Amino acid sequence: MSVLDAPRIRKYHLTLIAVAVLILVLALVRVVTGKVDITSSGIFQAALVLAVPIGLAGLGGLWAERAGVVNIGLEGMMVLGTWFAGWAGYQWGWQAALVAGLAAGAIGGLLHAIATVGFGVDHIISGVAINLLGPGVTRFLSEALYAEGTPAAEAGAGITTSPALASRPPEVSLPLFSSGPDVLGALENTHWFLVSDVAGILRGLTHNVGLLVIVAVALIPLTYVVLWRTAFGLRLRSAGENPWAAESLGVNVYLTKYIATVISGALAGLGGVFLVFFTTKYVEGQTGGRGFIGLAAMIFGNWRPGGLAAGASLFGYADGLQLRSSAAVTSFFLFGAILLLLYVGNRIRRLLSSSRETAAAAVAGARDYTVMAFAAMGVVVLMWLWMTVDRLPNEFVFITPHVLTLLVLLVASQRLRMPKADGVRYRRGEQH
């Protein structure tokens, strides 16, 4: 093993350790609270399903912003994907729904690219316009094509819903875990510490998985390979870091930004297709802000596919928990307290093992003590809430994923590094 390979392997090992610690903490919380749902296969199956549209929207944002185009219009592009997937799916089946949803999202991305890259419109204004345009266009089309007396209405459509899909995509179970008797299910039902928790997680992530779920998961490493291991990816990322330097090296920055933004819209549209597959039809408002949560997952992941996947998984798990077992949401208080306690312990270890000789180091040390003090206060508050609150009101349970989004962004904002030219107006030949 070369010296150059060591940092990458070390980071990979740290990721595995972090996953193992999270599973161990979840198992401990499950035993202490008695809430078996928090590591059940049903929760993780729901989390996987709910994380997919968030992850696809986040991937869409990643492609655009790595090329320097801020895309807050992901929600509108997802809405376009849902409507056209429902419209094509009830007539010609799930394959047509997939193509139509991808195409509709890509058209939304193309409109955003024309406005921002072609005409130099402010990226935020264009994104807001797309978010307003998506629901408006789909409502107009619904009133025109799903009104009473139309063939779609006779097939079960309404102003806010399409007819059911003519066919659904197949579901598969991964061979390694699904062949023979349901060993994972039997281990999950034993409720043994850690063993049943790992079995429940594996069973939830491998049994009866939709075809589009597999595609969505595969898109994460594929995105990494394309953007970080190919010449095209290097050109795309250079357009987001310094488009004028990329231009001087012969990169067609305009074309690169157009391609990235169209792919961004197509991925957001694919997230909308998944929602239609899950509900078997288009329903007005079914995106539920997932485009914005996907954008938050991308920011949480620091504009990297791996971090994005972690953020989408976190939001999907929180959403699945509040949908399937609202009573278990209070166990998050204990879970958060333990994680904060581990964080404080790690900070103390680092402070004791490092030297603080310079003035800059002293300032950093003071900042560390302040952060640790707030984290310790958080441990106390979360423990108090866990011991005193038996069940949260439904209103608080419902907004759990959205509150988690804000908290995660608040914590992650301390270490973010967006592409340097993200959102910057580019004109060929002009130096910024």
Image (spheres, grey):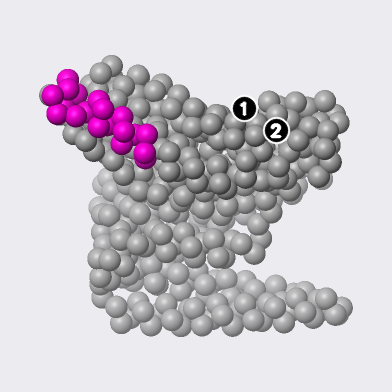
Identify the residue at horizontal 65%, vertical 57% (top origin): 416
Where 274 sits versus 419, above or below?
above
Q: Which mark is residue 238?
A: none
| Residue 223 location, quadrant | top right
Residue beneath disc 1: 259
Given residues 353 and 162, the one toward you in this image is 162
The residue mark sitting in front, 1 or 2, is 1
Given residues 137 and 379, the one toward you in this image is 137
Specify the principal SS of the magenta part: helix
Residue 7 in magenta? no
Residue beneath disc 2: 236
Identify the residue at horizontal 25%, vertical 66% (top origin): 394
Span colored in magenta: 135-153
Q: Earlier in the sequence, mark 1 or mark 2?
A: 2
Examine the rendering and report whether any part of residue 319 can be seen: yes
Estimate how packed mark 2 is, as few (under 14), some (14 to 19) or many (20 or more) residues with alpha carbons within 10 Å. Answer: many
Q: Is residue 323 left or right of residue 417?
A: left
